[in-house]
Image (cartoon, rainbow, N blue to C red):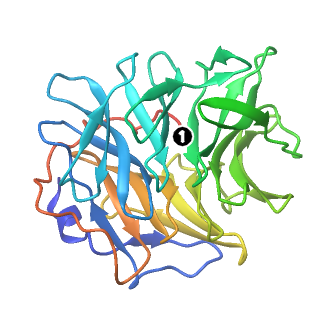
Amino acid sequence: MRNSLLLSVAAASLLAAGASALAGTSSWVPANVPAGGSGFTMFGINDSNVVTGDYINSSGVQEGVVGPFDGSNWTNFADSGGTTQPRALNNKGQITGFDTGTLQQWERFPSGNMKNITQGGNPVADALAMGINKFGVFAGDYTNSSGVEVGAIGQNAQYTQDIPLSISNTGYAGRAIDAKGDVAGWYYDSSGIQHGYAIVGGNTIMIDYPNAYYTVVEGMNNKGMVSGQWEDTSGVIHGFIYNIAKNKYTSLDAPGASFTQVWGINDMNTIAASAAESSGTESFAYCTRTNGCPASGAAKHTGLRPSGKPVMPQPN
């Protein structure tokens, strides 16, 4: 890791488009890698700053992990496919995710039991589940009999209904759901370009970061804040947050990073993010407050994921 990144973890390098930057009231807090691991990608964070994500263990296997942000009490877990990627968790400790090899979606319950997600009685192994609210209702997607990606919501490890997206599309996904049942995600236009959306109080909102090549929504909290990623015309990926009520976008770039990916967001507006710089890819909590931000703790901060490509080849 370059010294410039280490020296600037308490400051945000922000790009703003049609919005005021959050400089001076925000911070990038580096996450700790589980002991013996070679990397950690943090995807979800709840209101108690418990986080979930994946890492490469000492045997080179991709495992899931959940625990306090400071790394003081990790719990490792793995699905049957062996390439486990948790994507979101709620305050009760319910986790949704998928296996990056088999693409089987699953839900992990607070007891530690993992159950494959089904749709119409059949296992869903062609997309992923992500956001999950306090009632255990999750958002995700599946591929229908025509080969089209369809956003859906579900509960207790089964999809129960499709998301009624009114925007013309060639496929769409659910990625977040709040306590009221409002949902957010992304869709493909007729040219195969991704755009974000949110359905709030029955009203559909198109979410496109200004002048972006594509925009994807990955998270939404109960305070009307949306999180996600956008790509500029030079091919650089940035994170963003969007205030629905104020129609205000703020671009997020981790200090010293060549790309930044933003995932889940909790009700304290703390965001799970991953970023790449010359030495590798690292996870952060991006905190929009001056007080009450998660702390890295005393665990050793080491084990960057190898550099050369983003955490995900394409945000999904």
The residue shown at (61%, 51%) is 135
* Depth order, front residue of 115/172: 115
Number of dots carrying numbers: 1
The residue shown at (51%, 79%) is 21
Name the amino acid type tagged 1: Pro
Image quadrant where residue 3 sits = bottom left
* Depth order, front residue of 77/240: 77
Residue 214 versus residue 248 in the image, above or below: above
Residue 310 versus residue 50 in the image, above or below: above
Q: In the image, 255: left or right of 155? A: left
The residue shown at (37%, 23%) is 83
Quadrant for the C terminus, please: top right
Residue 69 position, x and y percent, is 29, 57
Image quadrant where residue 205 sits = bottom right
Q: In the image, 66: left or right of 107? A: left
Residue 125 versus residue 87 in the image, above or below: above
Location of mark 1 (residue): 315
Q: In the image, 268: left or right of 168? A: left
In the displayed image of the protein, which residue is found farthest to the front?
Answer: 111
* Depth order, front residue of 252/222: 222
User: Circle 1 — which element?
Assistant: loop
Residue 71 position, x and y percent, is 21, 53
Image quadrant where residue 5 sits = bottom left
- Is residue 171 among what the camera can see? yes
Residue 170 position, x and y percent, is 81, 31
Residue 222 position, x and y percent, is 62, 66
Residue 236 versus residue 309 in the image, above or below: below
- Is residue 172 among what the camera can see? no
Q: Residues within 10 Å of mark 1 (few under 14, many from 20)?
A: some
